[in-house]
Amino acid sequence: MKHGPDIARIASLIGDPARANILTALMSGKALTAGELATEAGVSASTASSHLARLVDGGLVKEARQGRHKYFALAGDEVAQVLEALMGFAAGHGHLRTRTGPKDAQLRAARVCYNHLAGTRGIQLYDSLLARNFMVLDADTPRLTEAGERFVRELGVDFDQLVKSRAPLCRTCLDWSARRPHLAGSLGRALLKRFEEAGWAHRVRDTRIVRFSTDGLRRFNHAFPVSPDSRA
Amino acid sequence: MKHGPDIARIASLIGDPARANILTALMSGKALTAGELATEAGVSASTASSHLARLVDGGLVKEARQGRHKYFALAGDEVAQVLEALMGFAAGHGHLRTRTGPKDAQLRAARVCYNHLAGTRGIQLYDSLLARNFMVLDADTPRLTEAGERFVRELGVDFDQLVKSRAPLCRTCLDWSARRPHLAGSLGRALLKRFEEAGWAHRVRDTRIVRFSTDGLRRFNHAFPVSPDSRA
DNA sequence: CGCACAATTCGATCCGCATCGAAACGTTCG
DNA sequence: CGAACGTTTCGATGCGGATCGAATTGTGCG
């Protein structure tokens, strides 16, 4: 009866409201302290501590002590993927959203998925790279072509640095609202960082929203064009 | 604090061992009766009934009364995707597999993911369609080209029937063991059905394993060739 | 019509665990 | 060293919900 892996164990970890709030908060990609997570989840410090211990034990969250605080972050891209998958389903089939505020529109447009760009802009980036053969899917996970390497170098990404770290360069991640893949992996991270450095966009404090400036958006559209019919 | 959708609600539904077993059983794609699911989950009939009611209420499972039994099935492809995502993570980070039996190897090779082909063979199929431009990713979800349409017609798929139903033709689904996309959607379903009809493969009773005959595998490899280096 | 079987409802039980406050521990800073 | 603060441990409390058996409803078959 019990073939597949122990899915109940980790689902029940996500299943508690307090822990779910913690994980959702960590989707911002930033490492947060135990105290911050406690207020974020709306529970006392002690309960939050207990929850965090369990999350770490379950492999969902990584901890790093720094002075007298302890910082927590998601254990990896894979955890973010699971959470996005859950959000994707819950968004459609959950009891209809209380009220779709303006925040939701912004989240759908561009947001950070753990540490890379997701939402409409994230999909645009992914599609554009594929359409112009800067990235191909032929055999393995998405793979950057030589032309693609030149391209990201021109954008100002420190490519040598990326290659040095062993982490996988390209990865796909399923999108939250539209059910479409976008670019994760260390390249996804690096690109988002680059956009921020270049002043194209900045994260809105305490949210996962990524706001593009009008000028930054123009440059982004120029760098990552898509065929007109797939514009969202 | 509480932006994103209600992920805790549905995660907690999956989080109970009995319900997780039920859902895993339903990943076979077959509709099962309440009684079968009860024994499968290892609980009494009454508790299973209660669980099933909750799963239906949560939108994870669909029910269909037929005579004096009630058949249950997963509510849709999206649910299967969430479950596969969870399995993918749990497989890696769960307490190391009790013992990797021969069944696991077969599951990794070829299995049914709700209703389409997954595992090494599923990935092979997906990659092959892309590599030969029978399918392209350019803008929207993967899309069958004209050449691809001819190709699947030659394989004996009733394509007109597929187009008539409104269900999306192509969809990607993240793989369980290797973290790679494979083909879901109505075309994915139809292809798996075709393989079974043609005698290339058959499902092993009461499992998600798909076993190819030696001759069937030869034909499959011929129909869906891949570049040698990506053979798994 | 009445028996057999599938599924559900009901009531009762019981365990897990989320939660908190207070106290203990560790670190930083004055 | 001592005070302030962040974090964790401990003990106690209470609630939700998983579970079962028995009784009930509903369906098919003889």
Image (cartoon, coloured by chain):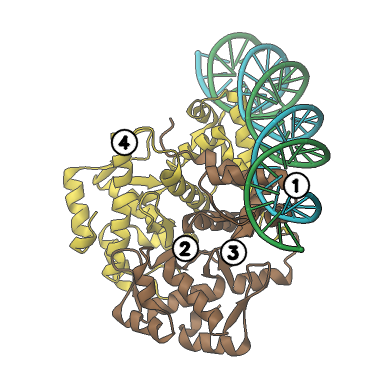
Chain colours: A yellow, B brown, C cyan, D green
Discs 2, 1 touching: Cβ within 8 Å: no
* Mark 4–mark 2 distance (CA, rounded to whole Å): 28 Å
Residue under label 1: B44
Q: Report whether residue A73 is seen.
A: no
Query: In the image, is residue D11 above or below residue A49?
Result: above
* Mark 4–mark 1 distance (CA, rounded to whole Å): 46 Å
Do marks 4 and 1 share a chain?
A: no
Residue under label 3: B30
* Mark 2–mark 3 distance (CA, rounded to whole Å): 19 Å
Rendered image quadrant of residue D18: top right
Badge 1 amino acid: Ser
Q: Of label 2 and label 3, which has the lower sequence position? A: 3
Between B185 and B107, the residue placed more toward the observer is: B185
Q: Of label 1 and label 3, which has the lower sequence position? A: 3
Please rate how many residues cluster around mark 2, counting C-alpha atoms within 10 Å: few if below 14, some from 14 to 19, many from 20: many
Label 2 lies in what chain? Answer: B
Do marks 2 and 1 share a chain?
A: yes
* Mark 2–mark 1 distance (CA, rounded to whole Å): 33 Å
Badge 4 amino acid: Lys
- Could you tell me residue A8's position as x and y percent? 64, 48
Discs 2, 3 touching: Cβ within 8 Å: no
Do marks 1 and 3 share a chain?
A: yes
Do marks 4 and 3 share a chain?
A: no
Residue under label 2: B173
Label 4 lies in what chain? Answer: A
Task: Report whether D21 appears left or right of A2.
Answer: right
Helix, strand or loop for disc 3? loop
- Could you tell me residue B183's position as x and y percent? 45, 69
Do marks 2 and 3 share a chain?
A: yes
